[in-house]
Image (cartoon, helix red, strand yellow):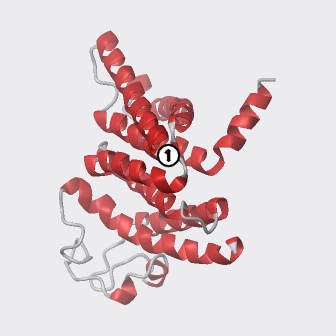
Amino acid sequence: MTLFGTPAAALLGAVVGSFLNVVIYRLPRGESLVRPPSHCPRCGHRVRPWDNVPILSYLVLRGRCRDCGAPISPRYPLVEALTAALSALLWLRVGPAWAFGPYFVFVAGLVAVTFIDLDHKIIPDSLSLGGIAAGFAASFVTGLGPVQSLLGAGLGAGLLLAVALGYRAVTGREGMGLGDVKFLGAVGAFLGWQAVLFTVFVSSLVGAAVGVAWGLARGGGLRLEVPYGPFLCLGAALYLYAGPELVGWYLGLLG
């Protein structure tokens, strides 16, 4: 049953990924997610339904608008393919259980937050605060439970808030946005307090390594600003898909 449903889960992910492209582009700009319909940003022509098939249409059109020939960002099929892969893997992890739905919503949020933060260095409240509310509601279905959900949300937001305030007190500069603080609260609401600790650990290690490498490569030294949201998303995704296994492996290394 699990393997049989995997292609359907991938298809669902690709379709939702197509919508996430709209969210990623419009939400930080304050635009409606439903009006106007999808259109070419250069010539304004409405995208035809057969030109809006996830992944496939991009390949058929060779990455260009059918009407004006303007290039279409490869970001669009990338988001669709990524969401399809994450959905299929989630199905293999969770299977045909009620928890698949809430966790899929969470994964879709991770994709949206990653690309919005990369583009704009913000995490909209509708995704962070909305994620906390959704995570609390999901806790009744996933088995986490409302108490653990609230505990996770409180620890997630409180931990990063303490780090942000401490950094500002020591350096006099803002080192982390409140969007990250609220978003880690959403991670905790969906996955619990253990996930918060895991996510902070992984995101700090990977974020520091990438930030230093990127800063040195760009000649910006160690003060190059790198959005933290994508690394939080990476840590949260790793916990969702393989958290217990990774923790067990790490503890085994320690002896």
Quadrant of residue 61 within the rendered picture? bottom left
Q: Is residue 53 above or below residue 161?
A: below
Q: Is residue 103 rendered to the left or right of residue 73?
A: right
Q: Is residue 147 visible?
A: yes
What secondary structure is found at the residue carrying circle 1? loop
For badge 1, the amino acid type reads Gly
Quadrant of residue 87 within the rendered picture? bottom right
- For the residue carrying disc 1, how many other residues have a C-alpha within 10 Å: few (<14), some (14-19), or many (20+)? some
Tell me what residue is drawn at x 27 percent, y 76 percent. Answer: 38
In the picture as drawn, the residue positioned furthest to the top comes out as: 170
In the picture as drawn, the residue positioned furthest to the right comes out as: 255
Q: Quadrant of the N terminus?
A: bottom right
Query: Is 114 or 238 nearer to us in this picture?
Result: 238
Q: Is residue 226 above or below residue 138?
A: above
Query: Mark 1 — residue?
Result: 145
Tell me what residue is drawn at x 53 percent, y 54 percent. Answer: 142
Q: Is residue 3 rendered to the left or right of residue 235?
A: right
Q: Position of residue 13 (x, y in %)?
A: 50, 69
Query: Is 215 or 33 nearer to us in this picture?
Result: 33
Tell me what residue is drawn at x 34 percent, y 29 percent. Answer: 176
Q: Position of residue 132 (x, y in %)?
A: 36, 45
Q: Position of residue 104 (x, y in %)?
A: 49, 61
Q: Position of residue 39 (x, y in %)?
A: 25, 77
